[in-house]
Image: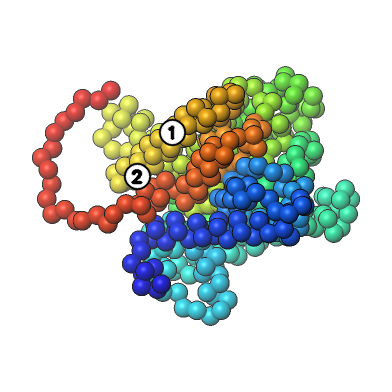
Amino acid sequence: MKITIRKMHPAQVLAVGYLVVILVGTILLHLPIATNNPGSLPWLDCLFTATSATAVTGLIVVNTSSAFTSFGQVVIMLLIQFGGLGLMTMSTLLALVIGRRIGLQERVVMQKELGQFQLSGLVKVVKRVLLITAIIEGLGVVILFLRWQPLLGAKKALYYAVFHSVSAFCNAGFDLFGNSMQNFSQDFITLFTISSLLILGGLGFGVVTDLFHLPKNKRLTFHSRMVLRVSLILLVLGWAFVFFTEYSNPETLGELSFGGKVLSAYFTSATTRTAGFESLPTGSLRTPTLFFAIVLMFIGASPASTGGGIKTTTFGVVVVTVFSIIRGKGETEVFQRRVAKETIIDALCIITLAMMLVFLDTIVLSFLETDKEFLDLFFETVSAFGTVGLSTGITPDLSTISKIMLILTMYAGRVGPMTVLVALSKKRKTQNFRYPEEKILVG
């Protein structure tokens, strides 16, 4: 087995590793002890839930609070934590606990999953990731416990605080209230805490570390500046868009106070980026809001974070490249730096593959679910790919094939479409020649 693993490409290790975790989670959720229903849940529902949790998505076919026992909910929470931190981070944690040495092959896979540019210092990076996670999730637990203790009682409040802190920081969107955060649509402490957790988780561990060391280093890295700039722009745009389009909608913001409207619009903008929590019923949002939410979900969070999507930097690089071309510049420039052409090509490939996957899934679902609205199916597909978890409410009613399509989409969204394709492709041979260059008319 060791020889086989050593011969595997890092992308194959990640693809197979996440698949194994999903299968283990499926088996655990199928156990009678995991469900409140007589017997066991259907295998497909268990597979869908395990994939959604490991892919930190949040799409559900059964209500988490009523369908699963405490054992089942803890399994879901552990899958969320595993999926949020990543396969190699959790594997390294286990290796450190048992005192096992981290080999070169593991370090190569860690480098790919953590988005690092060099092999040196990877174990320190993992330790830093674990420490950041413990601190941020711990703070979330304390704040949520203090807020919910008068409402739920000490024991239940602590349990709920731990579950939702993990779910929020890992951008999963699973909840135990049954209707997400809709009961707290005007609760500043709850919504601000949940949104802060998911934003920090979505920025990426490297960016959070960079922010922590800012007083000492006096400046941020180029990557961190790009992530923060794009994230802030998307957050503000989404906030303003939701506020104005839903302001008079009686089924969403219309009945809330002005402060509640501002708060819920902000929360909706933040959670749309890959978190999946909702303070407003998604199915009641107006068509322009749903469409704009699709754009935000497709972009998603940032690299090496707990979120999905094509990533903020991918989107940012392409947008900057377009504006550079419009201004007649031969190279992509931002923050007085040139962006490497390899990065631009990677960004274009990621967006192209993501669009192809989303379009294919939407077409298949539209063919199978003729009684559903196209926008609802499109929204569902992008939510699955972006590992968001928001839904207009159609997930439980989908056919078996449609659910399998979403399972594959969530898996690809977590592992990454390029990683999946590289894992499935044959080993490429190095070419020692170049073909003659030709020109093609485009546009």
Q: What's the residue at 72%, 19% (across, down)?
A: 248
- The answer to which of 348 and 257 lies nearer the viewer is 348
Q: Which mark is residue 399?
A: none
Residue 16, x across and y down, in percent: 45, 59
Quarter of the image containing the C terminus?
top left
Q: Is residue 405 above or below residue 165?
A: above
Q: Which mark is residue 360?
A: 1
Q: What's the residue at 83%, 50% (across, down)?
A: 148
- The answer to which of 338 and 26 lies nearer the viewer is 26
Q: What's the residue at 24%, 54% (across, down)?
A: 428
Question: As shown in the figure, which amino acid type bears the numbered disc 1?
Answer: Leu
Q: What's the residue at 10%, 40% (across, down)?
A: 436
Q: Is residue 391 visible?
A: no
Label total for image: 2
Judged left or right of residue 127, residue 38 is right
The part of the image, by quadrant, that contains residue 331 is top left
Of all residues shown, which one is farthest toward the front? 39
3D distance between C-alphas at marks 2 and 1: 21 Å
Q: Secondary structure at mark 1?
A: helix
Q: Secondary structure at mark 2?
A: helix
Point out the frontmost of discs 2 and 1.
1
Instruction: Write down the residue under mark 2.
Output: 346
Residue 189, x across and y down, in percent: 77, 45
Pointer 1: residues within 10 angstroms few (<14), some, or many (20+)?
some
Quarter of the image containing the N terminus?
bottom left
Judged left or right of residue 91, residue 12 is left
Question: As shown in the figure, which amino acid type bears the numbered disc 2?
Answer: Asp
Residue 265, x across and y down, in percent: 68, 31
